[in-house]
Image (cartoon, rainbow, N blue to C red):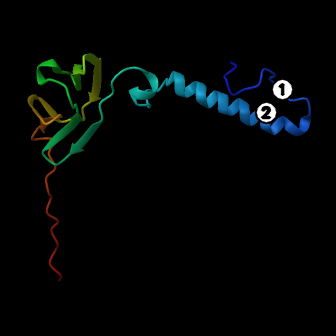
Amino acid sequence: MNTPWTNKRREPRSTELAPWSDLRREMEHLFDSFRQDPLGWLPEAFTSPGKLVPPLDIIESESEVTLRVELPGIDPKDLDLSVTGNTLTISGEKKETADKTEGGTQHVETRYGSFTRTVALPEGVDTNDVDAEYDQGVLTVRLKKTQQAQTRRVEVKTSPKG
């Protein structure tokens, strides 16, 4: 594959440049793997240009899992949350229009886009006990852990010295 930063020639003329050719081939392979992302390790921002990808934080405590998603400018009515099996899906659409009239000139700017974030939930999360709250552009989703999944402290006993 020829990329903008590669030369049309695939192999160097001299054997002295062979290590550079190997390096170039490895770098091309690396960039190709980033574009394809077969393992799904890359954020959607790298694999889906033009899509909105809101930042997401996941915090796990002894009793719950909390997700915080930054969604500034999105109307909570345009959000959709669903839980299927052990997967939480957050999707929505941002619609924003700025209309400014100044000195007989009207300037209208419209921004819109949709997003979907899918999160695999850890085992032991009670998917029937989900609480979602939207405040000042931040969506907070809390999922309680089942009683069996909660961490409990085990007392270590000592034997009397005899």
x, y percentage for residue 93?
23, 18
Crowd around label 1: few <14 · some 14–19 · many ≥20 (10 Å) = some
Left or right relative to 162: residue 27: right
Which picture quadrant has residue 26? top right
Query: Is residue 92 something that shows in the picture?
Result: no
Indicate the secondary structure of the residue bearing disc 2.
helix
Looking at the image, residue 68 lies above or below residue 96: below
Task: Give the residue displayed 41% in from the left and 28% down from the top.
Answer: 45
Task: Give the residue displayed 11% in from the left and 19% down from the top.
Answer: 77
- Type of residue at label 1? Glu
Q: Nearer the viewer, residue 31 or 4?
A: 4
Residue placed farthest to the right in the image?
Answer: 14
Q: How much space separates mark 2 and mark 1, taking CA atoms? A: 7 Å
Looking at the image, residue 147 lies above or below residue 103: below
Residue placed farthest to the front in the image?
Answer: 103
The residue beneath circle 2 is 21
Indicate the secondary structure of the residue bearing disc 1.
loop
Q: Nearer the viewer, residue 101 or 23?
A: 101
x, y percentage for residue 27?
66, 33
Task: Give the residue displayed 72% in from the left and 26% down from the top.
Answer: 6
Q: Quadrant of the N terminus?
A: top right
The residue beneath circle 1 is 11
Crowd around label 2: few <14 · some 14–19 · many ≥20 (10 Å) = some
Which picture quadrant has residue 23? top right
Task: Give the residue displayed 29% in from the left and 30% down from the top.
Answer: 54
- Type of residue at label 2? Ser
x, y percentage for residue 91?
23, 20
**Does the residue at mark 2 contact the one at mark 1 (Cβ under 8 Å)?**
yes
